[in-house]
Image: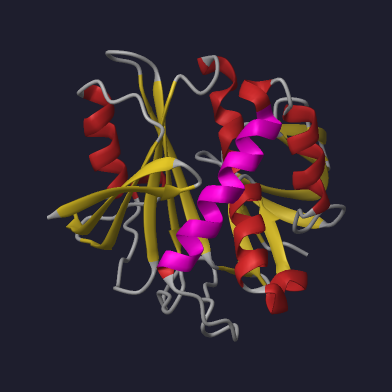
Amino acid sequence: MNREATDLAGVRHIAYETLGSTNAEALARARAGERGPVWISARRQDSGRGRRGSTWTSPPGNLYATLLLGDPSPPSVAPQLSFVSALALHDAIAECAPQIGPLLKVKWPNDVLVGGAKISGILIEGESEPAFAVVIGIGVNCVAHPPDARYGATDLATAGAMVTSGQMLMALSQAMQRRLSQWARGDGFAGIRSDWLKRAAGLGKDIKVRLPEREFSGCFEGLDDAGHLLVRGPAGLATVTAGEVFDLG
């Protein structure tokens, strides 16, 4: 069962009671020719997933939503949407819960942290047929969080902010429109990069980076012009294109 409305910053919104995964539904619609923009949300997911094939726990009360964008940019710069999305989510949480705004940070590339604990997840996926499309899946821990997450987790209620999933989605849709306009299909990434670095956790401090084949530690020096992580370790400056960041200072 679903209902459709146009109430999210002028963007279509299709709301479900239950889905396997909002990302999977958005990808199926993209393959069927849906161009978007359209938000797909669900009160709960049976098969939510995170990055690298991990399971995303989906109890009722949290936010599970995906934005489908048709041809949002040239494919070569679409990975920059990680930073666009992280900033939009940071903006939305700060708007809905201003009391925890000073505690918010972003962790490379797109996690939002509250007091060092993860409060959200973003999974970006794409389709090339019948046309290039990107789906941005966003989960926000509004009322609950997994107690056994590999990276420490929390939720808005635990942090002292009572925010419903509906309130969060409304603020997120508006913030996403603003950040997408700033990004301007990649032409405005310099501004996105600058704003992201102002909110970055661990900048200028030692961090641990986990790659598929190894781990190493070094000083988090910033991002390059493409958004890759710059870490200075014993062997010099390393550019990280994909990996996980731990032990933020």
At x 59%, y 86%, the residue is 160
At x 77%, y 55%, the residue is 199
- Quarter that holds the C terminus: bottom right
Residue 29 in which image quadrant: top left
- Closest to the observer, 135 or 211: 135
The picture places residue 207, in percent across and down from the top left corner, at 74, 55
The stretch of residues the image draws in magenta is 166-183
- Quarter that holds the N terminus: bottom left
Residue 35 in which image quadrant: top left
Residue 27 in which image quadrant: top left
Query: Does 68 sit left or right of 213 as displayed?
Result: left
* Residue sitting at the far left: 1
Query: Does 235 sit left or right of 62 as displayed?
Result: right
Q: Is residue 116 magenta?
A: no
At x 43%, y 40%, the residue is 11
Residue 210 in view, yes or no = no
The picture places residue 13, in percent across and down from the top left corner, at 34, 46
User: What colour scheme does the image use?
Assistant: secondary structure
What secondary structure prevails in the magenta region? helix
Query: Does 17 sit left or right of 235 as displayed?
Result: left
